[in-house]
Image: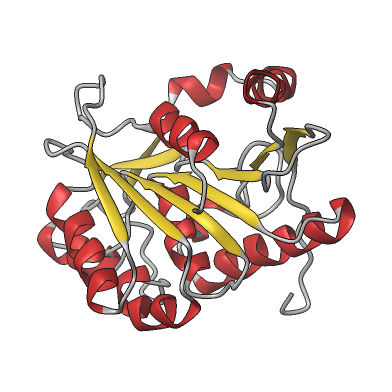
Amino acid sequence: MDGKYECLRFYGAQAEPSDRPPLVYLDGDVVNVVQPRTDPPVWTVGEFYQRLTPDLMQREAEHYSAATARTFINLARPGTYGSSGHHLERRRPREVALVDAAIDKLKARFGWTRIDLAGFSGGGHLVGALLARRHDIGCAVIASGNVAVRQRGVAHGLSTDVTGYDDVFDPIDHASEIGRRRPKRVIILTDPLDRVVEARFQAEFAEALRSAGVTVEQRSVSAADPAHHNLRSAAILAGLACADG
């Protein structure tokens, strides 16, 4: 892609036989800015990420698959969890295109015809972006998703994304394209007290989808962390439980 190659890693287990489409899960950001207005900004890596190993991630995927009798894939975003690439270039069109292409490769390799998606935070951004590109999505779950990137940046006093890039793929700008692709079911999980991606931005995305003719369920869920943001488990569970009909 653009003359550059990336290798995206995935962790997963296949349930057979199964008449349900696989769930492809996209995780949140693992490097976050703590002082966005300094030059250069100050970043931190989450402690949870430092403790993870490929074996732990694979076992988690196998547990979810075995418990629900459903194929589960945790697709690692560029620059995270063993995938090549630069994580600080997230939310740009290239990240979206790389994940989109990786899903196509998985479909071809395993013979899938349709997929369900779930994403948390930055992974929720990708789910919103993929809804504007793909015709094969049954159910899509977005938890604490950064789906109105520019609006959130302005509210935080930033003229660009926190990464410093201004060419982000902003899902809310593509609501009409999502409407034309008619996903079967979209579920947005929001903690009303979220201090990272404020609830109002998630609600504005939901309303933009409704205006484009998409049926959206927005559910209030309480996150246990102090920032009221971490709905990772809720995203996975909702995705595994979801059916498009």
Instruction: Name the residue rendered at 60%, 49% in the picture.
Output: 77
The percent coordinates of residue 224 (x first, y second) are 25, 19
Residue 216 lies in quadrant: bottom left
Q: Residue furthest front?
A: 245
At horizontal 24% and vertical 42% (from top left) the residue drawn is: 219
Residue 163, given in percent of the width and then of the height, sits at: 38, 58
Q: Is residue 205 left or right of residue 24?
A: left
Q: Position of residue 117 (x, y in %)?
A: 54, 50
Q: Is residue 244 left or right of residue 159?
A: right
Q: Which corner quadrant of the image does residue 120 belong to?
A: top left
Is residue 118 positioned above or below 107 on the image? Answer: above
Residue 94 falls in image quadrant: bottom right
For the point 59% across and 72% down, which residue is it?
A: 134
**150, above or below 17, in the image:** below
Residue closest to the eye, 6 or 222: 222
Q: Observer-nearest residue: 64 or 149?
A: 64
